[in-house]
Amino acid sequence: MFASNFIVDDKQLEHVRGQDNLKKFAQSTTIRSGNKMTNHFCSTCGTLMYRVGEAFPGVSILRIGTVDDFNLHETKLKARIEQFTKDRVGWLAPVEGVKQVVGSEYKDRRANAQL
């Protein structure tokens, strides 16, 4: 239904350890754009660590739950944008104080930058 993610420029992303333990699964049939999305899972526990999408070259989409620094969750990783709000279920309220976007803020920003 939803996921909490943050986007990192690949130039700023460094695998300190464990990259050899990741398994990949890629597909495009359930992605709205039809572009391929590759998921990187921990082969030990099955946790989805991050995603890389053809529609978003040069960045990785990381899961906030993979970060174990609570201070980062309260500061730099605190939600700023809630996307795809058109599809929100009725019983889930908007996050207070967070920008609401019908589609994808990131995708819209990148498209405008290319104009």
Image: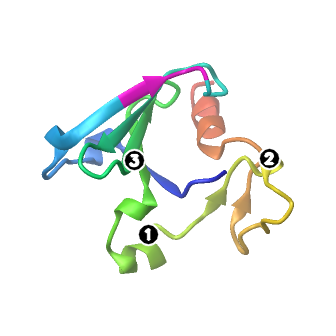
Query: What residue did someone put label 2 on?
Result: 87
Residue shown at 83% from the left, 65% from the top: 91
Circle 3: residue type: Leu
Q: Is 31 left, or right, of 43 in this rendering?
A: right
The quadrant in which residue 43 appears is top left
Disc 2 vs disc 3: Cβ atoms closer than 8 Å? no
Magenta span main SS: strand
Circle 2: residue type: Asp
Query: What residue did someone put label 3 on?
Result: 48
Q: CA distance from mark 1 to mark 3?
A: 21 Å
How many numbered dots are placed on residues in this image? 3
In terms of secondary structure, where does tag 3 sit?
strand
Whole-percent x, y for residue 85 in the image: 77, 52
Q: Which mark is residue 27?
A: none
Crowd tier of the residue under label 2, counting other residues whose Cα lies within 10 Å: few below 14, some 14–19, many 20 or above: few
Whole-percent x, y for residue 92 in the image: 78, 65
Q: CA distance from mark 2 to mark 1?
A: 26 Å
Residue shown at 41% from the left, 50% from the top: 62
Comparing labels 1 and 3, the label whose residue is closer to the camera: 3
Give the mark nearer the N terminus: 2 vs 1.
1
In terms of secondary structure, where does tag 2 sit?
helix
Q: Name the quadrant of the C terminus.
A: top right
Residue 74 higher or lower than 62, as above or below: below
Q: Is 21 left, or right, of 51 in this rendering?
A: left
Whole-percent x, y for residue 68 in the image: 32, 71
Q: Nearer the viewer, residue 80 or 25?
A: 25
Q: Kindly tell me whether residue 5 is visible in this rendering.
A: yes
Query: What residue did someone put label 1 on?
Result: 76
Residue shown at 79% from the left, 53% from the top: 88
* Residue extent of the magenta highlight: 25-29
